[in-house]
Image (cartoon, coloured by chain):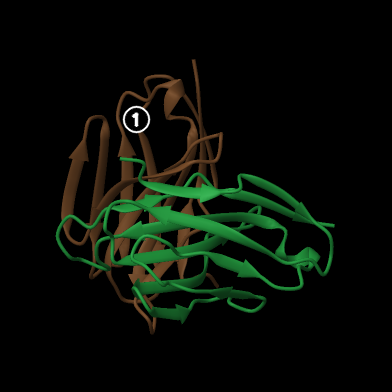
Chain colours: A brown, B green
C-alpha cells in the first residue's frame, strides 16, 4: 500500500464543473505540496500547506493534518486546467517528500 | 531568473554507458533533489542535498551518484547505464524543507533518458 494515495486516478469533467481531487496519507507528515504537471511534462508547485486552507485564483487547497487528508478544488474548471495533479507530503524517516501517483484531469469544452 | 535548469532534455544511452545529468539553480536554494518519474508511478527520490558538500541517499539511489560542490550545481551521474534506468528525471530545489514559511519547491523541465 502506498503511503500517499490519490483519488481519483483519472477524472474527466465538463468545462465549468467544480472539481475535487483527494490525497490521503498513512504516515505522519508536517506539510504537503500540490503540484501540477502539464501535458508537456513540466511540473509546477501550486501550494504548500501545513494547516487550514489556501486559495490561488480558482484553486483551493485544504488540509487536515490530524485526519491525514488533503483536497484540491478547482472552481469553474477550464480546458487549460487539464493536467496531472500530484500531492506530496513531507514525512518518513528522513522527512523527504513522498508523492502520490497523480490524478489525471481532463476538462472538455 | 532562470530557476532550475536541467540538461540534456533528451538522451539515448547504450547499456553500460555512463553520463551526467546537469542541474543548476540560481535562487540560492539550500535544498536540491533528484527525482525519477516512471509511467504510472509517483516521483521517486534518488538523492538529495541540504547544502554544498552534503548529499544523502533517497528512496532509489542504486546506480546513481551525485555531488554538490557549489550551492548552484547538483549533477546526477549514471554509471553503467541499465534499461531499468529508462525514465524521466527531474531536478528540484527549495529554500527549506517541510512546513517552514513560504517553502517554494521549483522543478526543472525534466530530462528524458532511454537506455537501449
For this orientation, the residue located farthest to the bottom is A93
Q: Is residue B63 left or right of residue B53?
A: right
Q: Position of residue A68 (x, y in %)?
A: 31, 67
Q: Where is residue B18 in the image (x, y as percent from the top left)?
A: 73, 67
The chain carrying label 1 is A
What's the residue at 39%, 64% (across, down)?
A: B32
Q: In this view, does A71 lie to the left or right of B101?
A: right
What's the residue at 18%, 46% (across, down)?
A: A54
For this orientation, the residue located farthest to the top is A109
Q: Where is A101 relative to B1, above or below?
A: below
- Count numbered badges in the picture: 1
For this orientation, the residue located farthest to the front is B69
Query: Is residue A8 something that shows in the picture?
Result: no
Query: Is residue A63 something that shows in the picture?
Result: yes
Say which residue label 1 marks: A18
Q: Is residue B17 left or right of residue B76?
A: right
Indicate the quadrant where residue B40 lies: bottom right
Q: Position of residue B70 (x, y in %)?
A: 37, 68
Q: Where is A64 relative to A58, above or below?
A: below
Indicate the quadrant where residue B96 lies: bottom left
Q: Where is B52 relative to B38, above or below?
A: below
- Near-viewer residue (A82 or A44): A44
- Tell me the element at label 1: loop
- Near-viewer residue (A104 or B10): B10
Quarter placement of the N terminus of chain A: bottom right
What's the residue at 39%, 73% (across, down)?
A: B49
Q: Where is residue A11 in the image (x, y as percent from the top left)?
A: 52, 37
Would you call the spot at circle 1 few (<14 residues within 10 Å), some (14-19), or many (20 or more)?
Answer: few
Amino acid at each position: 500500500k502506498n503511503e500517499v494515495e490519490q483519488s481519483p486516478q483519472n477524472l474527466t469533467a465538463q468545462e465549468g464543473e467544480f472539481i475535487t481531487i483527494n490525497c490521503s496519507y498513512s504516515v505522519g507528515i508536517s506539510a504537503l505540496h500540490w503540484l501540477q504537471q502539464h501535458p508537456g511534462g513540466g511540473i509546477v508547485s501550486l501550494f504548500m500547506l501545513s494547516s487550514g486552507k489556501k486559495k490561488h485564483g480558482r484553486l483551493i487547497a485544504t488540509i487536515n493534518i490530524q485526519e491525514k487528508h488533503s483536497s484540491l478544488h478547482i472552481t469553474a474548471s477550464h480546458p487549460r486546467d487539464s493536467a496531472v495533479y500530484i500531492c506530496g507530503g513531507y514525512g518518513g524517516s528522513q522527512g523527504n517528500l513522498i508523492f502520490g501517483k497523480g490524478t489525471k484531469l481532463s476538462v472538455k469544452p | 531568473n532562470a530557476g532550475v535548469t536541467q540538461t540534456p532534455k533528451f538522451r539515448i544511452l547504450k547499456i553500460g554507458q555512463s553520463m551526467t545529468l546537469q542541474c543548476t539553480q540560481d535562487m540560492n536554494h539550500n535544498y536540491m533533489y533528484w527525482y525519477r518519474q516512471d509511467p504510472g508511478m509517483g516521483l521517486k527520490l534518488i538523492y538529495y542535498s541540504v547544502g554544498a558538500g552534503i548529499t544523502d541517499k533517497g528512496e532509489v539511489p542504486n546506480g546513481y551518484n551525485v555531488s554538490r560542490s557549489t550551492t548552484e550545481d547538483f549533477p546526477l551521474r549514471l554509471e553503467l547505464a541499465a534499461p531499468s534506468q529508462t525514465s524521466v528525471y527531474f531536478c528540484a530545489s527549495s529554500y527549506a524543507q517541510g512546513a517552514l514559511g513560504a517553502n517554494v519547491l521549483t522543478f526543472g523541465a525534466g530530462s528524458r533518458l532511454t537506455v537501449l
